[in-house]
Structures are given as structure tokens and as C-alpha cells.
Amino acid sequence: MFPSYIHVKTSLLDNMIGVGDMVLLEPLSEDSFLDNLKKRFDHSEIYTYIGSVVISMNPYRSLPIYTPEKVEEYRNRNFYELSPHIYALADEAYRSLRDQDKDQCILITGESGAGKTEASKLVMSYVAAVCGKGHEVNKVKEQLLQSNPVLEAFGNAKTVRNDNSSRFGKYMDIEFDFKGDPLGGVISNYLLEKSRVVKQPRGERNFHVFYQLLSGASDDTLRKLKLDRDFSKYNYLSLDSAAVNGLDDAANFRTVRNAMQIVGFMEDEVQSVLELVAAVLKLGNIEFKPESRCNGTDESRVKDKNDLKEMCELLGIEQSVLERAFSYRTVEAKMEKVSTTLNVAQAYYARDALAKNLYSRLFSWLVTRINESIQAQTKARHKVMGVLDIYGFEIFEDNSFEQFIINYCNEKLQQIFIELTLREEQEEYVREGIEWTNIEYFNNAIICDLIENNQNGILAMLDEECLRPGTVTDETFLDKLNTICADHQHFESRLNKNSKFLNDHSLPHNCFRIQHYAGKVLYRVEGFVDKNNDLLYRDLSQAMYKANHSLIKQLFPEGNPAKVNLKRPPTAGFQFRASVGTLMRNLQTKNPNYIRCIKPNDKKASHIFTDSLVCHQVRYLGLMENVRVRRAGYAFRQPYEPCLERYKMLCKRTWPHWKGPAREGVEVLMADLQIPAEEIAYGRSKIFIRNPRTLFFLEEKRKQCLQDLATLIQKIYRGWKCRTHFLLMKKSQIVVAAWYRRYAQQKKYRNIKSATTVVQSYTRGWQARKLLRELKYQKRCEEAVTTIAAFWHGTQARLELRRLKQEARNKHAVTVIWAYWQGTKVRREYRKFFRANAGKKIYDFTIQRIIQKYFLGLKSNMPSMSPIDKKWPARPYGFLDGVHTELRKIFHHWRCKKYRDQFTEEKKAVYEEKLEASEIFKGKKALYPSSVSQPFKGDYLEISKNPKYQKLNSAVDEKVLLADVVNKINRANGKGTPRIFLLTKKNFVLADQKTGQVKASIPLPDVTSVSVSTQKDGFFALKLKEGSASAVKGDFLLSSEHLIEIITKLHRIGATAADREKLKVDISDEFLVQFKQDKVCVKFIQSSPKNGNSVSCKRKNNRLLEVSVPTSP
């Protein structure tokens, strides 16, 4: 009996376009390899396997294969269970790390523009999607992912091959806990291409961050950084490719700012980074001119000092120090110092060296700062997954030191790739108990040795040449190579015996050629020595260390004069060789996973497959060799359970269910199919198939069997469907008949019930109408009796009412007659009296009515209760003039009293201070009117609440009446130093703003007078009593935004104290201030506003400080 359904899993071999795994390609040749890649690429299948290695073709377009649904599809699935995808490799690596506790590394290699950076992003996004959830976990994942935009902005650039080319190598170790949740990460960077900062090849750009800053920063930010949006104003920015299609620099700048915030950068750190980027742009605009000296030598001088000045302002460096560093170089040897002048060429070299070092050190600081934010906080052992995204093999028309270093790194990666692949293959054979046969392959260790040998290697000879005394040039280095590497079979130059100069005219005099695993590369030795030395003059390092910029001091620690190291710094080649060695040792401790990225064309266009370009990459990536290594033993291997599940329908004994162990079932299956014994081998957990033809034979048989099974399933299904339909029709007929009979009986019952109801209703209606008629008759009789009685009682009541009304009219007539008589008598008496006093009565009555009307008018037109409201109603009559004035005074005094009654004691004190300020400054100080509307707050620093000033608050015993930040004026240069000013009833205190340390505490009796100017400045001088202990260092010249309040409080304290004289306030535009033993004149002048409206103080001579106060517009 067949099961009701068959569940068939998708597989690498199902619905395959071309061959998904190159190991199964038959026949295997370079042409068939390329044809298979092209066929899959044309059908948007960009991923192909070579065993466990993933080949990734850059599609140069977006594909719908990275959706959340795809992530779930590949999650927790076997590597070969689905079609090839980068998610399958990422899932395999993550599950091996989580479940088997094996540290993993994912090595992504390929040419520039092959999609390595995007591949690393996809791996990290997949791991972030499938690992655990939670607030902390999500925060770590977000920080790990957001580190990419920051590093891309500062480390990526547009090249002729790639619009977003990584110009540095990146290796990230992602750390996980025992559950597989990410805890943090550590990033290592290798060899930033810092020469790009000062010079870019034609058609390429500088690093992205320069263009993003100029395009996306706000106008206010650019103004603070002293920058302009026009790219053409900066010499370090190439103009022919400043704009790139598909790159929105402004939007990317906002993305980078947001990413830096998520990673954990503080706002002041972001500002410091942007200031350094702006300083690099300004540095490129500094130009030099020659200036002849008396000894005949040329000395460099800065042409236009504006860019130098702006750069020094950004970094907090004295302009003269940096200008001297561009003109002179100091060489120290043991106890001697020799200063030499720099010519124009050397000055430009020093400028570019400073720019390159400044940017590369900033990039290294960014990586370190990101590591501080994303590193795991716990110190327990972590599981680690490393992702290596490093530059691919580079062969340009003009190859220099950078390409030599990059290709050396790729040689090392190819070496470890072959070693680890063979080791993994051999370990699997041993693990499965199958005999291992050695495989012949090209070992590029001889090339690595040519480059990195400690005695005769090219890097060692380059370091030796750089350290050699005497004249060192690129030509002497090439001569040394020709001498030592003459017999090496992978080295060629014009003078060694391996060169084929007579037949090969492409080898110039100043070049050498190395036969790499990827092909021959011609290197031009020009610049090798300088780039390897990577020298930065000590004068420039010391100038940078003197900067007031917090970040600059961290980037140039060797500039500290206290830590001068005369030892020569390690060369660039030595540092890179050491870091590559560390990377190789790190990779060998982890289980490797490979992604080989291939660029299909040089036009960055979709749907174009250039056979020659892809063939070149296939060769130098060693992909054919990788396939041969994989196929040297057995081309295909699969665990017994999936193999039996896939092919069990090919044998009657294993179909539909095999009861025994899976291995026995596979052996029975293979025996039944008569597969030759030499074609298969049985391991401990897997079956190994030697030839791909055997696998394709199994797939063909399975395909035929599935067609037969589908036919059988269709037959059974159709029979079941017909029987089910017949039984359903039969059942439906019975149900319909039953429902019809029920309906007919219900209808007959309803008819009988309706007829009975009608008869009953007629009978009940006749009985009800008869009863109603009887009741109506009885009711009419009762109503007639009631009506007759009512009419009778009404008649009697109306007769009684008429009688009572007549009596009332008679009584009223008598009363009216009596009232008229009394009125007549009174009027006669009044006429006699009125004739005697009529005029006076009328006058008094009129005056009374006018005054009454006047007071009612005042009541309705009263002014507001504000004491400053001067409104008052006009008087209506002249005779009320005195009364009107007195009432106005009384009302004003009354509302002032009401207003005063609302004041608290503190408010009264404030108004008293305001009144005293008016007496002191009104009409004398131009600053006074602007202070009237400002309340006297007193404690502007909230010193009792602010924990920053807790120590200072505890040092002051009395109540603080005023706390503010003032500027203490320095006599030497007229500049101000911020100080905290505290005023109590007995003392005033000056303290350091940053540390809170008390600098001076002066008793108020020692203050004799205060001097201020008549203008709108905040300068005031506190003059101390001569001979007092406080006057040893002289008077205090200070400036404050709250000058009026400070002097008023000082004057008020002196006025209320009984034991001291009243404080004298001198208001003059010129006064003397005692500084130690000298008296200095402080003079105030008015000037036109040039640099804003700020007051400036300058020292004119030893006896004069001049304060310029801008005039009001």
C-alpha cells in the first residue's frame, strides 16, 4: 500500500541550471568550467560550489535572493540540501561554531570590484538574522553591522574597477557566547592605501569621506570647519570623477553620522574626526615658493598663509611652529642636533607625508575606537567567527609598492587555501576510514619565500637598503635584487639570466617581474624605498604634539619631547609582513570557509560575461586546481541517511521504508543497481562516489522512478476522487429527500394551525365587542350624573363670587377718597414752605446728582492696578479739579500698597538691588539699560546642586551670594582665563573652572574701589588696599556678562557693613590697575565691528592695555 503522500526535499541536484557543484562537472576542462559559470550567470544563478567552496559572481544589480524568506529557507539546512547560496555557507559556519564549538573563519578573496565587501556584509547580516534576540543582543548586532558604513566611508574609494573599492584589508573576529548569541567583535585593519590621500590615478577618487563631508554636512558645520562645498577648491580631490552614478554622498554622510552614533561615538569625538578630515583638505592647499638665502641655498616659504592659518585654528597649533616645520628639518644623532633647510620639493614631500600620516593614524584610531565599543565585555572564553575581507590580486598597467604588498598577501592566502583544503580533504578521508592518496599540486611556497625570506627575500633586502647609510635610491635597490635573486626561477629583470629581454621588449630598465601563482606582474621600482620608509620628519611630529586638539596628541605620541626615541621606526614592509604572519597564524587555528569572488566584466554592467576576464580570474584563483584536488579521490560524498532517503525508491527492498541501519540500506540499494565496487566506497558515516557519471546515473534513474511514482499516485488519486464523489452524491440525495419530506409536513402543519387561529380570533373578537358595548353604556350613565352636579356647584360659586367683589369695590372707593383728601391738605402746606427755600434745595439737589454721577463714572472707568499705568479719567467739571487730583493720588498710593503687599522678602531685596544699581550706573554706564530687564539671579552656576562644584562649595563656609564664570585678564597678552567668581558677605573667591581649585580668596575689607568704563563692555577692576596681604600680586582686572549685578552686590555689602567704608565706584574710560610692582593703564576705545560684536583686549606696551568696544550699528 502506497503512503497517502510523499514528501520530497529540494536538493542541489533538483531543477539544476548547469551544474551547481563544479566537482560534479563532466567532462572537466577549463572551457566546460567557464561554460557552466556563464550558463548559470545568464540565468541569475550567481553562486556555484566547488565542494564546500562558494564561487560568487558579481551581478552588478540587485537580485531578490536576500529576503527574510530566503534567510528562513536556508536556516538550519544541510549545506547541499538547497541550491548554492552564500547563506548556505554562512549557516554551515554558524552551526558548526554554535553546535560543535569550532572556531570558524570565512575567507573572501577576489579582484577589486568582484563583490568581496558585499559578500562580507551578507555573511554578517545572515548571522545577525539567525542568532538570538533580546535588547542587549540586538544592540551588539546593530553595532557590529553599523561599523561597516563608518569604515567604508574612511577606507573605501572609487577606482576604475569598482565604485566602492576597499582600499584596506579588514579582518573581523565576531565573538559568541555558548548559546550562539553575539557578544562583540574585534576588527583588524591592514595596509590602508594612504598614498591615495595626496594623489589619485586618473578616473579615480579620494576616500569617500571627503566628498561626503562637503556634500552632506550642514552649512553651519562647514562654516565651523572653514570648508566650502566646491570640490575644485581642494588640491587633494580629483575633479574628473568627483560625482559617481549611484552614489549619493549627502545621504551617505547622514548614514555615517547615524552609524557613528549607534556604534558609540560621542558628539565631541565626531566633531574632532571631522576637524581632522577638514585639516587634511586644508593641508593639500598649502603651497610653497623658493626663497634664496645668503649662502646660495634655496629655502621653502609658504605662499598663501590663509589655508595654513585655518588649519592651525582647526587643530589648535601655533602657526609659526608648523610653518617652521615646513621650512626646516632637525636631525638628532646621539648628543648632536643639526638643523637644515628644506627646499620646495622637500617641503611638498613633508606636506604630503604629514597628510598621509594624519589620515592613516586617524583611520587606525577609528578602528581602535570601534573595537572599544563593540568588544565583548565578559572575559570568559568565547566562540569566534572571523570574516576576512581583503584586497584581491591586482595587476595594473603601473604596479608599485602597494600592488607588490597586496599581491604578497594574496600569495599567502592562496598558500593557506591550498594547505587547508588538502588538510580538510585528508582529515575527512581519515575520519571516514578511507585510504588517502597524495595529490600533486603547485605549491606557491617558493614565491612566498622569494618575497618574505628573512635573509634573501625582497622585503628583507628592501628593509636593508632603507637602513643602509649612504645614498639610497630605487636603482640601488633594483641592483641588489638583480644580484641576489638572479637565479630564482620566478624573478625576472632586465639584467638577470631569467629575463627574456631579446624576445620580451616589455621589460623596462627600472622594473622587475615576478611570476605569481596568478600570473606574471611587472613592478616599477620607482617609489619603493620612500613608501617603505614612510618617514615623517620629527619636527612635524613634535609640531602636531604641541596642538591643543585632544585627538592630535593621541595620534602623534612620538612628538612628545620627553619621550624622544632616536631609534628608526619599523618600515611599512616589515609591519605588513608581521601583521600578515599574525593573520595566517590566526586563520590556521580556525575552521576555514571560502568565498571566491569573480568579476564578470570590466564595465560594471549586468548581463555581460567576458570569457577572457573570467578565465584569467579562474586561473589565478586556482579554481580548476581546487576542483582537481576535490575530485582526486572521490567526486561526491553524502551521509547515508540523506542518500537512502533520496534514492530508496530505486530498489523494491528499500521502498517505501527501510527497517535496518542506513548504511546497510545503501549497500543493498547499490548492489541492486549493480554499481561497480570500484566506483563507490563506504565510510563510517558517508558513501563516497568516485565518478560524477555514477551520480548522474543515479539521478537519471531517480528521475524515471519519480515519473512512474507520479503516474501511480495520479491513478490512485483519481480513483479515490471518483469514489469519494459518488459516495458524496449518494449521501447528498438521502439528505435532500429527508429535508423535502420534513418541509412538506411542516408546511401542512402550519396551514392547519393558521386556520384554527383565525376561527379562534373571530369568536374572541365578538365576545370582546359585546362586553365593550355594555361597559360603554354604564360609563355614559355615570358621566351624566357627574356633569349635572358640576353645573349646579358652578352656578352657586359664581353667585357668591359676584357678592364678594361688590363688597371689595365699596371698601376701595372709601380708601381712595380719603387718600385724595389727605394729599390735598399736604400740598397746601408744602406750597407755603417751598416758596421760602426753593432755590437752595434745587442747587443742593443738582450738586448731589452731579457728584453721584461723577463717582459712578469713576467706578466704571477705573485704570489698571499696575503702578506704572499713568492713565486717569478726565474730570467732567472744573469745580471738581481739586477733588479729582486728590482722588488720583489716593488711588495711586492705594494700588502701590496693594502691589507692594504681593512682594516676598527675596523679591523686595532684588528690587532694592535694582534700585541701588540705578543710583550707581543710570546715565553713567552704557551697559546699564540692557541689564534693567535681566533679573539678578545670583547663583548662576547652581553651585550647591552641581556635583562638579561639590569640593569648591565645601571649601566656602559662608552662604554664596553670587556664583558666576568671569574672565581674568592677563596683563602679558590681554587674553582672558575663565575663573569661577564666588561672593560671600566677607570674601570674594576666584577658582579654576575645570578643577575647582581656589586660586585667590580676598576679604572684602581689602577691596577699596571698583573701576569700570562708561561703555557697553563687561570689564571691571577690583582695587585692593595698599599694604594688605591680598595686594601682594596686585589688583584684579576681570570681565563678566553680569558686571552690573556683581558691582551692585559688592557696593550693597559695603553699605550694610558697619565695620568698613562704603565701596567707591569709579566710572571712567581710562583708569590705572596695579599689577604687582607696576601700574598699567587700561584704556577703552570704540571701534567698528569687524569680527563679530565681541570686545577685544590687546597689549599695546608694558604700560597700556587697550580695550576695543564695537559701536552699535
Image (cartoon, rainbow, N blue to C red):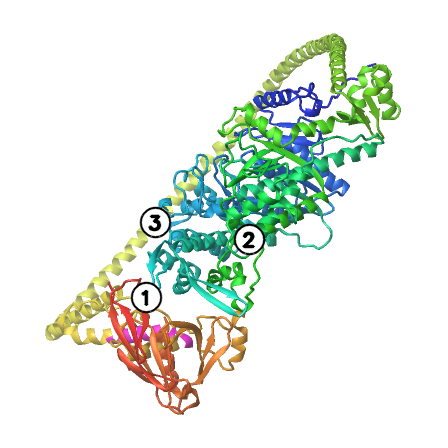
Is residue 910 or residue 991 the one in the foreground?
991
Mark 1 = which residue?
1094
Distance Cα–Cα, label 1 vs label 3:
107 Å
Is 855 included in the stretch rendered in magenta? no
Residue 275 horizontal/vertical position (percent): 44, 55
Mark 2 = which residue?
466
Disc 2: CA contacts within 10 A as few (<14), some (14-19) or many (>=20): many
Q: Is residue 1005 above or below residue 806?
A: below
Distance Cα–Cα, label 1 vs label 2:
54 Å
Please state if 62 lies on the left or on the right of 758 as rendered. left
Q: Which residues are magenta?
A: 889-906
Is 900 included in the stretch rendered in magenta? yes
User: Is residue 322 at least partly visible in the picture?
Assistant: yes
Query: Which numbered disc, 1 or 3, marks the residue that appears first in the sequence?
Result: 3
Query: Quick one: SS at disc 3?
Result: helix
Please state if 234 lies on the left or on the right of 80 as rendered. left
Front: mark 1 or 2? 2
User: Is residue 81 at least partly visible in the picture?
Assistant: no
